């Protein structure tokens, strides 16, 4: 009888498994699913943020920063006569490049939306203060922004050189198609392009370039 009762008890244990033998596998199988969904969601959100940043940057012209090789092939060449253009200064007065024939000219194509342009502006001002007594004319042409934006940024940096504005590059674009910001063009007294710099400049580099064109007869 005792043996029979033990056999029945063993049978009950085998036929009626405990919760630990049935619930645990289900929990183990289900736990990774929420974590996987969270990872996928995070990746999708990150991709959307990156895509939005690239779009906004492209709309603002950031994609044109640093494309020196492209700009070099589009611009007029060193040794050539600088092509002429006429655009407006911040007061709406027309300024023509060829009007400065007989003076060394430093052209700076820039935009206040361009981080390297913003960073170099104080150095550009200090370099101009050293070059102005040598007769160097600095024409800083603001592109792809309103004249008001250019004026406000120039005022914050105490710029004393001439700021020109060509928001849509209609006046300067045919002569100087800019695909890199900033772009610097140094022109001698005869109107010949002597140097092109497709990167930000510090004070000493800018002064050396300016003195080079100023010293040519």
Image (cartoon, helix red, strand yellow):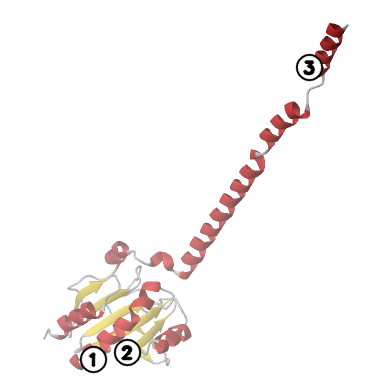
Dot 3 or dot 2, earlier in sequence? 3
Which residue lies under the disc numbered 1? 132
> Is 132 situated above or below 39?
below
Q: Quadrant of the N terminus?
A: top right
- Residue at 31 percent across and 87 percent down: it is 96
Q: Which secondary structure, mark 1? A: helix
Which residue lies under the disc numbered 3? 14
> Is 160 situated above or below 54?
below
Q: Marks 1 and 3: which is nearer the front?
A: 3
Q: CA distance from mark 2 to mark 1?
A: 9 Å
Most extreme residue toward the right, as rendered?
Answer: 1
Tell me the tag on residue 213.
none
Q: Which secondary structure, mark 2? A: loop
Discs 2, 1 touching: Cβ within 8 Å = yes
The answer to which quarter of the image holds residue 66 is bottom left
- Residue at 29 percent across and 62 percent down: it is 69
Which residue lies under the disc numbered 2? 161
Q: Position of residue 18 (x, y in %)?
A: 78, 26
User: Mark 1, residues whose alpha carbon is within 10 Å: few (<14), some, or many (≥20)?
Assistant: few
Dot 1 or dot 3, earlier in sequence? 3
Q: Position of residue 169 (x, y in %)?
A: 40, 76
Dot 2 or dot 1, earlier in sequence? 1
User: Mark 3, residues whose alpha carbon is within 10 Å: few (<14), some, or many (≥20)?
Assistant: few
């Amino acid at each position: 009888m005792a043996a029979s009762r033990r056999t029945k008890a063993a049978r009950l244990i085998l036929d009626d498994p405990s919760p630990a033998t049935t619930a645990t596998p289900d929990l183990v199988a289900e736990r990774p699913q929420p974590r996987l969904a969270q990872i996928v969601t995070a990746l999708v959100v990150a991709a959307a943020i990156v895509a939005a940043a690239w779009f906004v940057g492209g709309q603002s012209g950031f994609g044109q920063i640093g494309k020196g090789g492209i700009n070099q092939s589009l611009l007029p060449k060193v040794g050539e006569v600088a092509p002429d253009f006429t655009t407006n200064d911040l007061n709406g007065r027309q300024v023509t490049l060829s009007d400065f024939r007989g003076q060394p000219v430093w052209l700076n194509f820039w935009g206040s939306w361009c981080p390297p342009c913003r960073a170099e502006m104080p150095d550009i001002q200090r370099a101009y203060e050293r070059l102005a007594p040598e007769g160097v004319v600095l024409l800083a042409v603001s592109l792809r922004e309103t004249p008001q934006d250019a004026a406000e940024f120039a005022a914050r940096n105490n710029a004393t050189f001439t700021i020109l504005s060509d928001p849509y590059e209609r006046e300067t674009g045919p002569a100087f198609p800019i695909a890199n910001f900033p772009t610097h063009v140094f022109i001698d007294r005869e109107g010949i392009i002597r140097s092109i710099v497709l990167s930000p400049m510090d004070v000493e580099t800018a002064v050396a370039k300016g003195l080079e064109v100023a010293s040519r007869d």
